[in-house]
Amino acid sequence: MSKLRRLRQVARYGWKHACQISNEHFSGKKRYTIFFDIFRCYNRYGMWSNQYLKERFWALDAGERSQIGNSYRQANQKREEWVKDFYENREFIAKWSKYDIETSAAKRGKRNDAYRKRYNMGEGSIVEYGVEFSRQHHLPGTIKIGRHVLFAKNVFIDYSGEVIIDDNVKIAAGVSMESHHRDLEAYQRGKDVNIPTQLHICEGAYIGSRPCFSQN
């Protein structure tokens, strides 16, 4: 996510939360005063306005603000790096997965090279159009792909967990794979908890067209 886009989010939600704090939490401070304090905390700690609200940051002394703010800075920095990679990945997929690349052998070769570089893919692997690799839910997953692996058209692989694909694997058109699952008990309690898993496809495997499965 670009810095400008993030600042717009901070402004949008910061103004909303500043109103909530001023009107509902009886902070004794005006809305614009809280709003500017939210921005200061974002610049200093990378703290978002919902976190500012959750911690009742406007009511803390300097020592408490420093301690809590620094803990958020580390966590939010990792999240920002994940978000940056996520948007870069979306741009990569939009550029290299297009059908029209199929019309030129040279373009297909460039696509294979691009996928190999970005996704730790071995030599001799082939990627057809519509192939998407993606991480979800801010999970720090990894993907490792061996040599001479074929990804046919419209394959989707989620690498939110750990994905390992050995040499000489063939994955047919439309295959969908997931390497995480939702904690249904937590979901029933109103929480969105996603658990990464490992997906390992052994050497020489052939996965036929249109299956959809998840490794739990």
Image (tube, grey):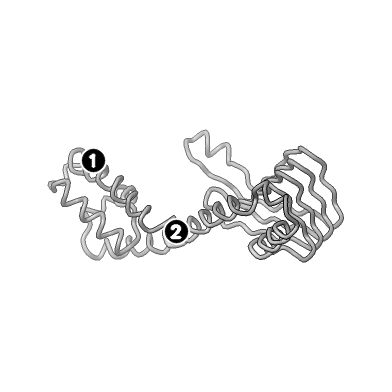
**Marks 2 and 1: CB-CB under 8 Å?**
no
Furthest-front residue in this view: 104
**Vertical side of 70 occupied by 200: above or below:** above
Residue 119 % position (x, y)? 66, 61
Q: CA distance from mark 2 to mark 1?
A: 26 Å
Judged from the image, the secondary structure of the residue bearing numbered disc 2 is helix
Which image quadrant for residue 72? bottom left
Q: According to the image, label 1 marks what residue?
A: 20
Q: Tell me which numbered mark, 2 or 1, is placed earlier along the sequence.
A: 1
Picture quarter with the N terminus: bottom left
For this orientation, the residue located farthest to the right is: 204
Foreground residue, 115 or 119? 115
Observer-side mark, 2 or 1, equals 2
Residue located at (73% from left, 45% from top): 153
Residue linked to disc 2: 80
Amino acid on which disc 1 is placed: Gln
